[in-house]
């Protein structure tokens, strides 16, 4: 189910976000970047899909609003942790 509800100046569907904390019970950690695929009413949470660099989906996770930040306007280079 995909919801496309959002308020002005808030995170919207299909927007890139990054994690502000590790997602317990998953492989996703602080700093990982994903795409919002659903927005829950009142911006309380999101469904975020994470991808590998080759475009393969790594999974969709439900996150609370305080766990993510919009990546809009961030001018940093994404990089790979080669130690992994």
Image (cartoon, helix red, strand yellow):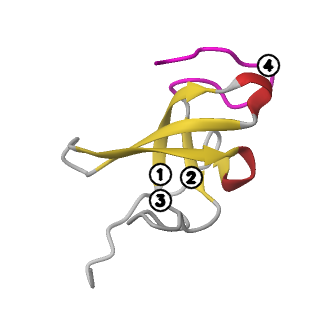
Q: Please give the name of the residue rendered at 67% of the width and 15% of the height, measured from the top-left corner.
A: 5
Residue that carries the numbered disc 4 in the rendered image: 7
Is residue 13 on the magenta stretch? yes
Residue that carries the numbered disc 2 in the rendered image: 18
Note whether 79 is above or below 68 in the view shown: below
Horizontal relation, residue 67 to residue 44: left or right: left
Residue that carries the numbered disc 3 in the rendered image: 32
On residue 33, the disc is 1
Residue 70, visible in the rendered structure: no
**Residue lying furthest top in this view?**
4
Q: Which is nearer the N-term, disc 4 or disc 2?
A: 4
**Residue lying furthest bottom in this view?**
83
Q: How far apart are marks 2 and 1 (CA)?
A: 4 Å
Is residue 55 on the magenta stretch? no
Quick check: marks 2 and 1 in contact, CB under 8 Å? yes
Per the image, label 3 sits on a secondary structure element best described as: loop
Viewer-proximal residue among 62 and 48: 62
Q: Distance between the residues labelled 2 and 3?
A: 5 Å
Horizontal relation, residue 78 to residue 71: left or right: left
Viewer-proximal residue among 43 and 72: 43
Q: How far apart are marks 3 and 4 (CA)?
A: 24 Å
Which quarter shows the C terminus? bottom left
Quick check: marks 2 and 3 in contact, CB under 8 Å? yes
Quick check: marks 4 and 2 in contact, CB under 8 Å? no
Quick check: marks 4 and 1 in contact, CB under 8 Å? no
Per the image, label 4 sits on a secondary structure element best described as: loop
Where is residue 68? Give x, y as percent. Answer: 65, 50
Quick check: marks 3 and 1 in contact, CB under 8 Å? yes
Q: Which is nearer the N-term, disc 3 or disc 4?
A: 4
Graded by Cα atoms within 10 Å as few (under 14), some (14 to 19) or many (20 or more), the crowding at tag 1 reads many
Q: Which portion, as a residue range, is magenta?
A: 1-14
Q: Which is nearer the N-term, disc 4 or disc 1?
A: 4
């Amino acid at each position: 189910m995909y919801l496309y509800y959002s308020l002005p100046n808030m995170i919207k569907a299909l927007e890139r976000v990054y994690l502000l904390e590790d997602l317990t019970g998953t492989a996703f950690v602080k700093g990982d970047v994903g795409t919002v695929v659903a927005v829950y009413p009142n911006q309380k949470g999101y469904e975020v899909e994470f991808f590998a660099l080759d475009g393969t989906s790594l999974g969709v996770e439900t996150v609370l609003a305080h766990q993510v930040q919009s990546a809009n306007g961030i001018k940093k280079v994404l990089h790979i942790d080669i130690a992994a």
